[in-house]
Image (tube, rainbow, N blue to C red):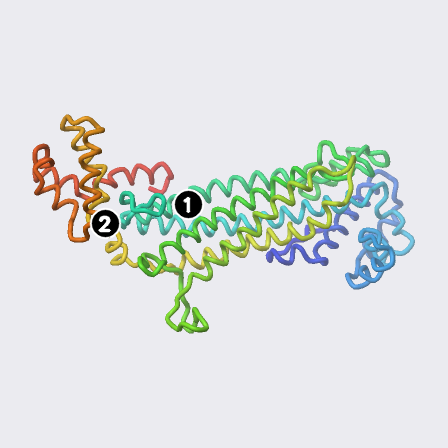
Amino acid sequence: MIERYSNPEISRIWTLENKYRIWLWIELEVCEAWYRRGLIPEEDIDQIRKKANFDVKRIAEIEEEVQHDVIAFLTNVKEHVGKAGRWIHYGLTSSDVGDTALSIQLVQSADIILRRIDSVLEILKKRALEFKDLIMIGRTHGIHGEPITLGLKFAHFYAEMLRNKERLIEAKRQIAVGKLSGAVGTFSNLNPDLEEEVCERLGLKPEKIATQVISRDRHAFFISVLGIIAGTLERMAQEIRLLQKTEGREIEEPFAEGQKGSSAMPHKRNPVISERICGLARVIQSNVMTALRNMPLWHERDISHSSAERVILPDSTIALDYILDKMCYILNNLHVYPENIQRVLNATRGLIFSQKVLLALVQKGLEREESYKIVQGLAMEVWNDPNLHFKEEILRRDIFRKYLTEKEVEEIFDLKAFLKNVDAIYKRLELL
């Protein structure tokens, strides 16, 4: 009985051992299909079942001479099987085996990455709920805007990662195809029903139409999704890096006991894991362009894509799995400093309430343009004078006292007013 080969470690998916094991699985399934159709005699299929195997080192030796990896593999398998090995690869071309195996490797990789994504989602959900009400400053252009909560940041990442999961599930579906249609895809030496039968046993759908290869739009889409997921992780890591800056230090990635941040400055606590995530995300995204360039092959195929894929597909899947794991570590062990968050929130001395003051004056009957001019004028004074506080100046200046009571000003400067609809956002995300 032929059992599906799998391995939980993503790096081992891309070893020669795993690749050749999948190649052998495909070849044996095709032999079984030919046997069921009466082509291969029973004594030969028995020999194939019992003796079919390979040796990675021996394949490398043969490939040195023949300069063709599939021929080297088949030669070595026949060395194990003997005369009955003449039926192995009957009616097939190299890409039938190589491309179908590559689809299986990508499906195996996607399964592992999806489990990693589930782990990240679980932690993001936990953090989003844990810090739902921890008020902090929101920024646009890097400048203080209005208050949000730390939980909302995690909720943003949670929603984006949910979309990434959906994207990868679709990319996995699109790449889970096999191709056993011969030299230029015309089934000249086998029939579509054999392809359908074998693909089903491999856990794949048959490619509806192929050249000598499975069209590379499927691979380009797959790796593009990996690039998007990497972009989400870089966005998260960059946010941590920004919030860890010394002058704020609102949150901080874990810094292990015995860890050192600088060869020269013993005080340093650098966000090196977050920086590593950002760097590897860029590597993955740069590989997307190569995958796109692999789409336009000459006529029914050339192999300009092959050498590139041997680099970009293992590198991208392994790197993404790695940075997903590192993000899990960061999120699980993240340091949060509420006192620093509060200090930073108050850094502009009340200016973050400027829109609420603007709208309150509009409600009192002022034209928006006039209200904006009045509020901005005072805001610029507060920006320029560290001894001024926005709320205190509003309470003492006649232009504001003319329209706003002290009670109304107190209500305007209530932080909770900014966040009255946070629960509604969480319910949309099904976090509550």
Residue 297: percent from left, percent from top = 74, 38
Q: Residue 303, which numbered label?
A: none
Residue 156: percent from left, percent from top = 39, 43
Residue 226: percent from left, percent from top = 56, 46
Quadrant of the image containing the C terminus: top left
Q: In terms of depth relative to the viewer, which is nearer, 285 or 321?
A: 285
16 relative position to 45: left or right: left
390 relative position to 259: left or right: left
Name the residue rendered at 44%, 70% in the picture. Answer: 262
Circle 1: is it few (<14), some (14-19), or many (20+) Cα within 10 Å?
A: many
366 relative position to 280: left or right: left
Question: Which amino acid type corresponds to the residue marked 1 in the rendered image?
Answer: Tyr
Task: Estimate the spatial distance between the alpha carbons at disc 1 and disc 2, rounded to whole Å.
Answer: 30 Å
For label 2, the SS is loop
366 to 181, vertically: above or below: above
Name the residue rendered at 37%, 51% in the picture. Answer: 126
For label 1, the SS is helix
Name the residue rendered at 77%, 35% in the picture. Answer: 211
Circle 2: is it few (<14), some (14-19), or many (20+) Cα within 10 Å?
A: some
Name the residue rendered at 84%, 38% in the picture. Answer: 37
79 to 33, vertically: above or below: below
Nearer the observer: mark 1 or 2; the answer is 2
Q: Residue 348, which numbered label?
A: 2
- Mark 1 lies on residue: 158
